[in-house]
Amino acid sequence: MTRLPPALILGAALSGAFLLVALVSLLWVPHAVDGVAIANRLQPPSAAHPLGTDQLGRDILSMLMVGAQTSIAVALIAVGIGVALGVPLGLAAAASRGSLLDEVIMRGNDLIFAFPSLVIAILITARYGPSATNAILAIGIFNIPVFARVARGGALPLWTLDYILAARTAGKGRIRISAEHILPNILNLLIVQATIQFSLGILAEAALSYVGLGAQPPTPSWGRMLAEAQTMIYTHPMLAVLPGLAIVLMVLGLNLMGDGLRDALDPRLRRGRA
Amino acid sequence: MLRYLLTRALSLGLSLVVASVVIFALIEVIPGDPASYMMGLNATEENLAALRAELGLEGSGLSRYLDWVGGMVTGDFGTSYTYRVPVANLVLDRLWVSLPLALYALTLSTLIAFPIGILAAARRGQPADYGIMGATQLGIAVPNFWFAMLLVLLFAVTLQWFSAGGFPGWSDPLAAMKALTLPAIALALPQASILARVMRSALLETLDQDYIRTARAKGLSRAQAIRRHALRNALIPVLTIIGLQFSFLIAGAIIIENVFFLPGLGRLIFQGITQRDLIVVESVTMLLVFAVILVTFLVDVAYALVDPRLRRR
C-alpha cells in the first residue's frame, strides 16, 4: 500500500470535521440552544448569527452543531449494539459451522433481515414513547444481524487455514481461537461495515426524528429541524436546506470513508467494486 | 425446483408466524396496559374495562393472539378505535394510494438505474463512469424526505408546476398520477442510485468472464457482448436488490406520505400512533411486514426462473 485512496482522505476529512464539531459543541456553542428569544426569530445571517436564527430565535449554527452530537451519538451507540451482539454471534456460528447453533443464529438473522426495519423502529418508538434511547434500540437491533453475517462470512474461510489447525492441535478451544486468531483477522471487514452502518444510522435517526419519533425537544436534532422547517418552506426555505445539507455531507463523508477504507485495507477489491 | 419452492414457502410461513408474534408481543404483551395507554390519563375505571372488553384484552395472551391472527387470515383486521370502522376498510382505501406510489417509484428507479448503470459499466474508468458514480454516491447520501422537501421548494413553490401535497383521488387518473409524481421521484432517487451501482458492478463482474471474452473474440463489439450475453447474467444480483428495495420503498413511503400529506398506509400508521389507536397500528404494521416478506419470497421464486442452476437444488 503506497498511497491512500482519495475517497478515504476526502471522506475521513468530512466525517472528521463533523466529529470535531460535535465534540466542540459539548464544550462551546456560539449561542445557547435551549433559550427561546422570540424577538430574535427568523433573522437573516449576520455577524452574530452566521446562519441566521430559526422560528424560536435560536441560532441555527449552534442548533446544527448540537444536532451533530445527537446524530453521531445515536448512530454510534446503535453501531456499538450491533458489534457487541452481532460479532460474538457471528463468530460462534462460524466456530460451530453446520451445527444447530449455527443454524439457529443464521435463521434468526434472516428473520430480522426480512423485517422492514424502519416500520419496526416506528412501532417500537410508537408503543414505548418517542425518545433518543428508543431510537437507538430500534436502529441497533437491526445492526445485529448485519455484523453477525459479516463476522461469520469473514471467519468461515479462516477456520480452514493451517495456522488455525495448528492452534487447535496446540489445544486451544474454539472460543479462544475465535478471540485470538479469528477476530484480529476479520477486523478490517468489521471496520468497513461499521462505517457503512454508522452512515445508515445517521439517515435512520434523521428519518425517525423527522417524524417525531427520535430525540425529543429541546434536544436539537437535524431530522426535527427539518420537520419544523417544513411549515415555513414558503417563507424561509434556508431553514429546510441547511439541516439537510448537514445530513448529506456527514453521510457522504462516511460512505466515502467506508469505500476508501475497503480499498485501502483490501487491494483485491480495488477492481470492479460497486 | 419443487423442493426449492417448498423450502422457500416453508420459510415464508415461518417468517410470517415469527413476525406476527413479535408485533403482537411488542404491542400487547410487554409492560403497560394497552387500554390505559389508548385512553390516556383521565380514563375512568369503567371506560377502561369497556375498552378492554372491546379489544378482547380479557383472555390469555395466547387466545388473544390466535383471535388476532385468525381474524386477519379471514380478512378481519379489527375495528379502529378512533374511526369506528373496520381496519380492513381503512386499509383498502389507503392501499389505493400507497401501492400505486410504491410501484410508480419502483418503475422510475428501474428506468433510471438500468441505463446509467449499464452506461457506467460500458464506459468503465472514463469520465461518464466517474460522473455517474459520483452522482449515485450523492444520491445514496440524500435522505428521501429532504429531497422531497427540495422538490416541493423547486416544483411547487418556485415553479408552481405541481401542488405541494394532497391527493385528489382516482376519479381523475391524470391528476392522481400528477399528485404522486413528486413523491415517487423523491422515493426513487436513493433507490435508483443503489440500483445503478449494483447494475454496474454486476455487469463488470460478468464482463470479466471467459464467455464474454469468447464472444468478443468472435467479433462482437463490447456493446453487443453486453446486450447479448452479459446483461441477462448480471440480472440476478439486480433482481435481489429490486426485491429488497420494495421493503425500503414501503418504509420510505411511510415518511414520504407524511411530507406530501398523501392519504396512504403510512399516514394511517402515524394517525394511529398520534391517536393511540393501537389496533390500527398493529394490523397495518403486520400487513406491511407481510407484503415485504411476500415480495422477498416472490423474488426467490423469480430467481429460480431466471437461474436454472437454482432449480436443481
Image (cartoon, rainbow, N blue to C red):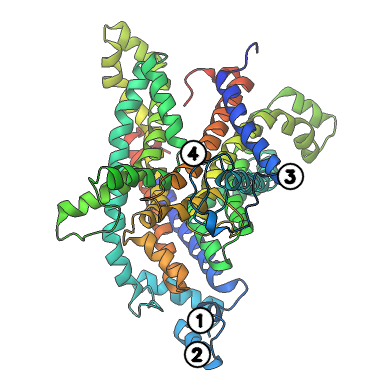
Label 3 is placed on what type of residue? Leu
- Chain letter for mark 4, please: A
Q: Of all residues shown, which one is farthest toward the right?
A: A170
Q: Name the residue under label 4.
A: A245
Q: Vertical placement of B292 versus B57: above or below?
A: above
Q: Residue at x 49, y 55 (%)?
A: A55
As helix, strand or loop, the secondary structure at mark 1 comes to helix
Disc 2 crowd rating (10 Å Cα; few below 14, some 14-19, many 20+) is: few
Separation of residues labelled 4 and 1 (CA atoms): 40 Å
Determine which residue is flagged by label 1. B39
Chain letter of mark 2 equals: B
Determine the image quadrant of residue A91: top right
Q: Where is residue B213 in the image (x, y as percent from the top left)?
A: 36, 11
Q: Position of residue B285 (x, y in %)?
A: 44, 63
Report if the CB atoms under discs 4 and 1 are less than 8 Å apart: no
In percent of the image, x 33 and y 24: which residue is there?
A: B118
* Residue drawn 40% across the image and 36% down it: B310
- The three-letter code of the residue at mark 2 reads Asn
- Give the alpha-carbon distance from disc 2 to disc 3, as whole Å: 50 Å
**For the image shown, how many numbered marks are present on the structure?**
4
Disc 1, disc 3: CB below 8 Å? no
Label 4: few (<14), some or many (≥20) within 10 Å?
Answer: some
Q: Which chain carries label 3?
A: A
Any part of residue B301 in sight: no
Image coordinates of residue A264 in percent, x first then y, are 62, 20
The residue at which mark 3 appears reads as A27
Assess disc 1: are there few (<14), some (14-19) or many (≥20) residues with their C-alpha within 10 Å of its C-alpha. Answer: some
